[in-house]
Amino acid sequence: MSQANPAKSAVAASTPATSIRAVLPELWALTKPGIVTMCLVTTAAGLWLASMLRPEMALGALKVIAALFGTAAAVGAANALNMYLERDGDRLMQRTRTRPLPAGRLHPRVALVFGLALGAVALVVLAALVNPLSALLAALALDTYVLLYTPLKRRTWLAVFVGAVPGAMPPLIGWTAVTASVDAPGMALLLVLVLWQLPHFFAIALYRAAEYKKAGIKVLPNERNADAARLQSIFYSALLLPASLVLVPYGVAGAAYLVVAGLAGALMLGGATYDLRAVRGNRGARRFFLVTLLYLPLLTIALVLDAIVR
């Protein structure tokens, strides 16, 4: 007689939380706080840069808080609704099986209502207290992530290109909160985030290919092969370097940023070329994944500090 998997039994034994004290931490987990924090940082960077370059358009404290809260709420809503839609597949993956829904700690209906309500609050706050354009961009990101990217992940690995757009929207929302327009510098910020996300995700897909296959999510290493994912990572890391430097001629950044962005871009490209070699396997993919995590904070800090010293 086969023995039960302890982890699986623990998951099955969980019961949905009912008290407010028990439900709140689970709702917080649904928003993916780590991703929300990263998006808040990039939104703040967009706000800061636009305010420094267009001081006559700088926002008051209330609008800044509203822009940050609205963007964070929109991102949290997208994550919560994504977890609601993917709760069955999440049970099959080691890294997601302990989330509130697959673990049975939260009722799916609660997650759905929470995600919809949080998204509605986000859009109302942005539209009423910031501007309609920022609210429109947040709505576009939310709808694209939940209604297009999430179902496409089970149909084609190309879904990664769809998902990169809403994931790159926060700095543009921050920019438009100040300028109320989608112009070249704001789109340059968007482009940098889109190009960064592609090698970042391919790295995850390489070392978690077996889990994605088990969950029925289409990723490039499984649909083609690992070499294809490595080449894609190198290609988009190579594009990321000049794309990040475009911010300088647009006047968004200066010499200090140019140096840091050049070094960080070289680190990304070097990591994709060296760490993703076939001989390094999963260990190399994990190492490159960490490089991608380091890149974005470096670039954001360089942008902000450059704007201060100029």
Image (tube, rainbow, N blue to C red):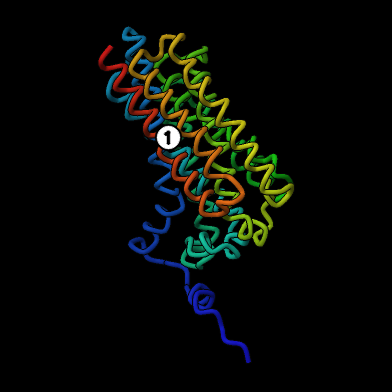
Give the residue at x 56% y 43%: 201
User: Horizontally, is 214 left or right of 25 in the view?
Assistant: right
Q: Which of the 4 image quarters holds residue 63?
A: top left
Q: Nearest the camera: 177 or 250?
A: 250
Q: Which of the 4 image quarters holds residue 197?
A: top right
Q: Nearest the camera: 244 or 172?
A: 244
Give the residue at x 62% y 42%: 230
| Residue 254 is at least partly visible in this image | yes
Give amino acid for label 1. Tyr
User: For mark 1, what is the residue?
Assistant: 295
User: Horizontally, is 293 left or right of 137 in the view?
Assistant: left
Q: Considering only vertical position in the picture, is 101 above or below 138?
A: below
Where is residue 291 drawn, in percent x and y? 45, 41
Report helix, strand or loop for mark 1.
helix
Where is residue 287 drawn, in percent x and y? 47, 48
Crowding at dot 1, Cα within 10 Å, few <14 / some 14-19 / many 20+, comes out as: some
Give the residue at x 62% y 31%: 235
